[in-house]
Image (tube, rainbow, N blue to C red):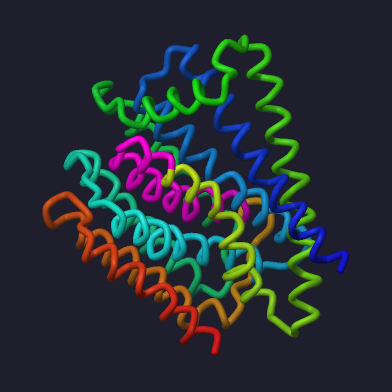
Amino acid sequence: MLDYWLFAGGLVTLIYGGDRLVASAARIAAARGLSPLAVGAVIVGLGTSAPELVTSLDAALLGLPGIALGNVIGSNIANILLILGLAATYRPLSIDPASAKRDIIYLLIATALVLWALHTSQIERWMGFGLVILLGVYIATLLRATDGATAEANIVAKDSRDTGIASETSRHDAIWAIVGISLLVGGAHYMVQGAIGIAEDFGISEATTGLILLALGTSLPELTVTLIALARNESELAIGNALGSTLFNLLGILGTTAMLVPLAVPAEILGVHVWVMTAAIVVLCIFLRTGWRLNRWEGLVLLGAYPTYLATAFR
């Protein structure tokens, strides 16, 4: 029973910490004069991917590479099939063609590199360094983009006003950012511990634990941002957050984790899961390229593929 409490408590703490980190970091970035595009894409994307980063790092340091890798792959599958599928089914989603072209190119390159690294049987430190470098190039490209893209910044700003803490000083925001990071670290640690115990009780492998339990849990911040975006009629943010989070997962999380701890790749990861992730990314890119929008029927295709994946991969 303790494992269930650890998992639930860690998950709640992790989500709250991520929320505080995103809100505080967004205000700090705005106060520093960063462009609205940088505030929205980089802060929201990094912030919602922070739970996956801390969880994968914690799992890798505990000697559980299957959980670390499974968390990233499972989160990406959930981001595209479940979250974007659900969002597009509810409301068609449009995206700026220039932004979509940039993100699609980086996403396909990142996917190809990760596929190659996974099939070397171990992701070495130098491979992780290369992935992080590519993430830096992507962020630099994003920061140079036009300041006219204000949708993502608007959703962050409106969210900050809704919380009633928009009047906090930069000092208070810095303190809350530190608190948020601390909650992320603590929440991820106990969530991993609880998930390991639950998995052992049911005889579930560590890779499956990462692919399902942790992946769904750490994808909740992305789901929250997407729901907020839909409620505020900010369809581009819904797509941008999912694309950005998927890129950060592939490049930042895998890269940073491998730089600290080389990751041996379990055979289970190389089976259906990595190819489902790859197929989901390719199909999403094709859908976005046709009309620069995600229609309801395309959302239904993505959403319907998720339970199909679960039913076939874990039967």
Q: Quadrant of the N terminus?
A: bottom right
Residue 19, given in percent of the width and then of the height, sits at 59, 37
Q: Is residue 73 above or below residue 312?
A: above
**Residue 190 as seen in the image, left or right of residue 76:** right
Number of numbered discs on residues: 0
Query: For the view shown, which residue lies furthest in the bottom direction?
Result: 315
Q: Is residue 44 left or right of residue 68?
A: left
Q: Quadrant of the C terminus?
A: bottom right
Q: Is residue 189 magenta?
A: no
User: Where 209 sits versus 46, above or below?
Assistant: below
Q: Position of residue 53 (x, y in %)?
A: 61, 49
Which residue appears farthest toward the left when viewing the image?
291
Q: Is residue 278 above or below residue 141?
A: below
In terms of depth relative to the viewer, which is nearer, 242 or 220?
A: 220
Residue at horizontal 53%, vertical 43%?
Answer: 48
Residue 304's image quarter? Answer: bottom left
**Compared to 109, does 307 lie above or below?**
below
Residue placed at 56% from the left, 62% from the top? 216
> Which stretch appears magenta?
228-257
Residue 231 on image: x %, y %: 37, 40
**Rendered image quadrant of residue 297:** bottom left
Q: Which residue: 63% across, 74% down?
A: 207
Residue 251 drawn at (x, y percent): 47, 51
